[in-house]
Image (cartoon, rainbow, N blue to C red):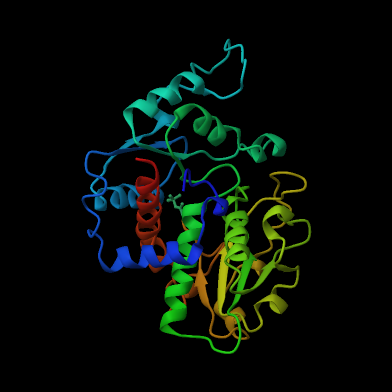
Amino acid sequence: MKNFISVHDVNNIDALVQQALAYKANPFIDKALGQGKRIGCLFLNPSMRTRLSTQIAAQNLGMEAIVFNVGSEGWALEFEEEAIMSGNTVEHVKDAAPIFGKYFDILAIRTFPSLKNREDDYSELYIKQFIKYAGIPVVSLESATLHPLQSLTDIITIQEQLKQTPITGRKPKIVLSWAPHVKPLPQCVANSFAQWVNAWGQADFVITHPEDYELSEEFTKGATITTNQDEALAGADFVYVKNWSTFKDYGKIYESDPKWMLVNDKLKHTNNAKVMHCLPVRRNVELSDEILDGPNSLVTQEASNRVWAAQAVLNELLRANT
Ligand code: CP
């Protein structure tokens, strides 16, 4: 593994999941691996789980983790090539990234989309510029279109659950269900979840959302897509709840009907489905209290597994590149 920005950087998803679960059972087994190595975690946007789990994962491997809130504490970065920097940006990524490359052995970056210009966001310019100029392995802590550490965590959590309650004679049915939200949110988590479940290939995968909320086919190809949530939920083993703004007419909110919120009543026709969400979650907008506080919710387990996903990825990068 050279960088970790999407599922395409992974040779074997199952092997990475097994490595993560091995770290969950024995967190400090590779404590010597990262001795003397440093990871820089750059946040252009807010985070709780990603920043803490990545730091813990690095420390479990003996690395030093340094967090830099570039978005709120650093110089405003310019990413466009040949920019005439007479506006608000102070430092070009071309100048900053090689310095990060000298300070750190691995660079991890969170950079959200603007949700204003689809072409710009989907070009993934920011993370690609860091890869181009840093000269060290780059890990996505969520980019403009994808959130691979979250998706790896989600596959780990599903596999753990399947180990505990095996399903025989058929593939597990996993449903990605759109939920309402008060703000336009990126498509990253939904894109990434679809990309990973499709690449994993071990599920009957259904995506349900309102009219005009189609995600990019680049990520959803292989899934069954329906605007009928009840139909999608029938027989589901896992329901992954997430809001995203529109992709076609980019970054808009077309729908806010609370009927799309997952409540216990909607689980009636599922196979006692476990419910997942990447968090943070808007209670009683995206997901009801009764689900989040009830026995079907996996959200805390899921968030705790972020550590093991990050540790498995850092292990691969350290072994392959440093
Ligand atoms: N799920 C997730 O990425 O959480 P944070 O935004 O808190 O890092």
At a point 71% along the width and 50% down the height, the residue shown is: 246
At a point 54% along the width and 89% down the height, the residue shown is: 168
Horizontal side of residue 32 vs 41, given as left or right? left
Residue 276 to residue 272: above or below: above
Residue 149 coordinates in the image, percent (x, y)? 46, 54
At a point 55% along the width and 54% down the height, the residue shown is: 7
Q: Please identify the quarter of the rendering in which residue 156 is found.
A: bottom left
Residue 67 coordinates in the image, percent (x, y)? 33, 37
Residue 203 coordinates in the image, percent (x, y)? 60, 74
Res 282 visible: no
In front of the other: 282 or 225? 225
Horizontal side of residue 197 vs 312, given as left or right? right
In front of the other: 154 or 228? 154
Horizontal side of residue 114 vs 318, given as left or right? right
At a point 39% along the width and 46% down the height, the residue shown is: 320
Residue 67 to residue 302: above or below: above
Res 87 visible: yes
Residue 11 to residue 115: above or below: below
Q: Which quarter of the image is occupied by the C terminus?
A: top left
Total marks in image: 0
Residue 170 coordinates in the image, percent (x, y)? 61, 85
Residue 317 to residue 25: above or below: above
Q: Please identify the quarter of the rendering in which residue 267 is found.
A: bottom right
Q: Please identify the quarter of the rendering in which residue 208 is found.
A: bottom right
